[in-house]
Amino acid sequence: PAAIYLKDYQEYPYSIADLTMTFDLGEEKTTVHSVCRMSSKSGSSVPMMLNGDASLELKGLYVDGKPLVEGVDYDLSEKELLIKSPPSGDFVLGCITDIEPQNNTSLNGLYKSDGNFCSQCEAEGFRCITYYPDRPDVMTKFTVKIVGDKEKYPVLLSNGNLVAEGDLEGGKHYAVWVDPWKKPAYLFALVAGQYVALEDKFTTKSGRVVDLRIYTAAHNSHKTQHAMDSLKHAMKWDEDRFRLEYDLDLFNIVAADDFNMGAMENKSLNVFNSRLVLASPETATDFDYNRIEGVIGHEYFHNWTGNRVTCRDWFQLSLKEGLTVFRDQEFSSFMNSAPVKRIDDVMIVRSRQFAEDAGPMAHPVRPASYMKIDNFYTLTVYDKGAEVIRMYHTLLGEEGFQKGIDLYFERHDGQAVTTDDFYKAMEDANNTSLGSFKLWYSQAGTPTLKVTTEYNEGDKTFTLNCSQELPVTPDMTQEKKPQLIPIKIGLVSPDGKDLVLTSVQDSTGSETSIGNATTYVLKMTEMSQSFTFKNVPVKPTPSVLRNFSAPVKLEMEQSSEELKFLLSNDSDEFNKWEAGQRLITNLIFDLLKSHQSGQELQMDNSVTEAFGQVLTDDSLDKEFRAYAMELPSTEELADKIPKANPVDIHKVRNFVLKSLAAGLKDKFLQIYNANNVKGAYKPDREGKSRRSIRNCALSYLGKLADSDAEIKALLNTSFKEASNMTDQMAALGAICGNAGEDRENALKSFYTQWSNEPLVMLKWLGLQAGSNIEGNLKVMKELLEHPAFDIKNPNKVYSLVGGFTRSAVNFHAADGSGYEFLADLVIKLDKLNPQVAARMVGPFTKYKKYDDARQALMKAQLERILATKPCENVYEIVFKSL
Ligand code: HT7
Ligand code: ZN
């Protein structure tokens, strides 16, 4: 496939006043009749290009009632329909297509899930429904009539307001929906089937009463209350924090079992992967409850950031996604612990986005080209995009940021715009120039920020010498320019308190008065630059990049003593956690060297002691303490060293976990017992914090179970007595860390208990797939044939296959068997669902990170996939990787 370039963008030459669609839903075929009132923008006739997938069967095409003739009036190719000379004034274009949703395994366009009709049109699914200018800058008002069998499809939904409904002959019925807001085709949705709804209401600040409905299959109707609560919280929060109100009288959410991604923000008809809607204490974990709250918020927030103001083209995807992720992060921080949420988000950026940025698919937040846009719903566009928005916030402050947001909506409501427009609104609203900040959008790769420091006893000054290094990435050959990096800093005095900062001078000579704050945001604009703080009475320990103020790799030498000091004293909770991470990372890499030179591993007891102090520090939030005990993932560690051997890293990491478990066993037991509270499950902050430290303790204790009968018994009791899924999964996970009878029994009993709950089966599949017990590939092959697995369901694939790729021992087995297994699956999936297949190729794209032998084995599998002539989605990733 050919690449599409941002630089080639051209406005669509026609506007569409409105679009009326009729869907006649059938078992063998569905007929779609669309009628557009169009006009040429220039007032002259220019060829009109309509997108259309090869699966469409064109049944009729007419202009102003006159049928068009193929070859004469229009040309039809695999992906396009070209009307050669449409009228130069206003005209009506009609199009009739037949489609087969029941055979659509790609879950793109209109498809069937569990017998119900369901649609997914972002990014380019609408072209699988009818011929249309399927691009986000073509916006119009939609009227949708749905006709279907009343018994099979009692619920008929689309965007906007229901304006008519009624019965038809032959057991059919119909519904007509009108959306008063103009929108691009990617926000269109249709759902038809057997559902029940949980209903509620929300009254907006200005007094609009909004009907809220969450539709699910009847047997899941008791699991939607948390989603409804989350929706109401999100609506209220968006009014309070961003002054943004909902703009229709109805907001619907539908849960679909078969869905390629998490959820979709279709105007007033959000469609959700059911795993992100359904929750009950018995079947969902605290993690699931948080995810549901965050994603319900995310999709709701899109109503303004994405729907009211949308993207001009798909290169601007981060305009809506980065901004909406930032908004959902802020919402979750508000609802839960802000430092913990920040740590969670940074862990994702560092362990996964940094790896993407260092691989063959590296692209800027605003990519310059793509082959398949589906492949650009990435951690870079979403999560690095959110970090970019956060940096505006850090640089401009809450008030300045809000001013920018207000101006953005004032200027662009109802438009399809670019990230440059957003940037301009931020600058103009604050009457400032953000200079090189814009480069965060156009330069790929993670900058490395190198910092050295010096204290001058005589002058009482403290200097930071900073330099930034911008990596070479495959997308960009010319030299990169320095990016504006906000560096949030505090100086901690030996008594553990933050020093008051009075003024700072940078290497260009300009001096800024700080005004007695204890943290300050340095604006680094050069490749290298130094900053000198004045009036620093004692030699401080610097706390740099507080709250992870920029998505960079910080390289700064600090001794173990300094890191331990920050771990116990830093007032910035993110950097307190970070100090522990750096301390343990240094230890793991030292041990890795010993391991690879054949030495026996020896734990550093002072590290155990430092971690023990945080673990038992009652002044800290319990959830924060649990996070502080979590070690960097094998992936994140592998990303930090060249030619990584993931199996060795896993072994050493496991040694450190075991050593901490042994060294702190009594403390873990005490914490487990103190927090092992019986009683009804509540997904509130108090309950979640308590369970998180309880289960952190249980997980560490599980590391000792192979040699400690008392702990073994404790795990089994914990599993048997669990009264909610959070505790049950924690116990199962701890038991499953060791091979043996207990593991087999627990897995069997879990299966027996939950085999009728597909969402719980995802956990069962995922846990087994991610196992680091040697030889687990055999189990994987069995699970592929198990009734709990279904290759056509993306959730099952993500749990089983995605889970497997996180197993250092089995996926990265030295004989290449894990890689071969993944390639086999990608080849199979390629024929069924290109988007899911392409996601599964992801782990191979990082092959250059690993040792020579593994690189060769992974590369061979990429070549094998390429030889099968895969679909465009898979092709783009494999081709760019090789
Ligand atoms: N905006 C939504 C994106 C999405 C999507 C993209 C490609 C293929 C399938 C998809 N399902 C949903 C999700 C979001 O970010 O809110
Ligand atoms: Zn989104």
Image (cartoon, helix red, strand yellow):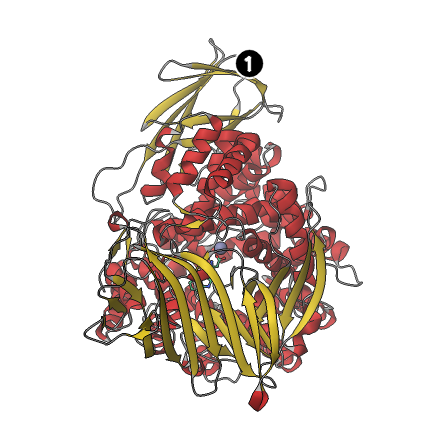
The residue pinned by badge 1 equals 537
Quick check: 172 above or below 825? below
Residue 853 in which image quadrant = bottom left
Q: Amino acid at mark 1?
A: Pro
Residue at the farthest right position? 679
Frontmost residue, 650 versus 500:
500
Return the x and y of residue 583 as percentages of the image width and height: 50, 41
Left or right: where 506 falls relative to 548 = left
Left or right: 622, with 106 as reference point: right
Residue 660 located left or right of residue 22: right
Q: Nearer the viewer, residue 43 or 656?
A: 43
Q: Quadrant of the N terminus?
A: bottom left
Secondary structure of the residue carrying tag 1 is loop
For label 1, the crowd category at 10 Å Cα-Cα, with few meaning under 14, some 14 to 19 and many 20 or more, is some
**680 relative position to 645: left or right:** right
Q: Position of residue 746 (x, y in %)?
A: 63, 76
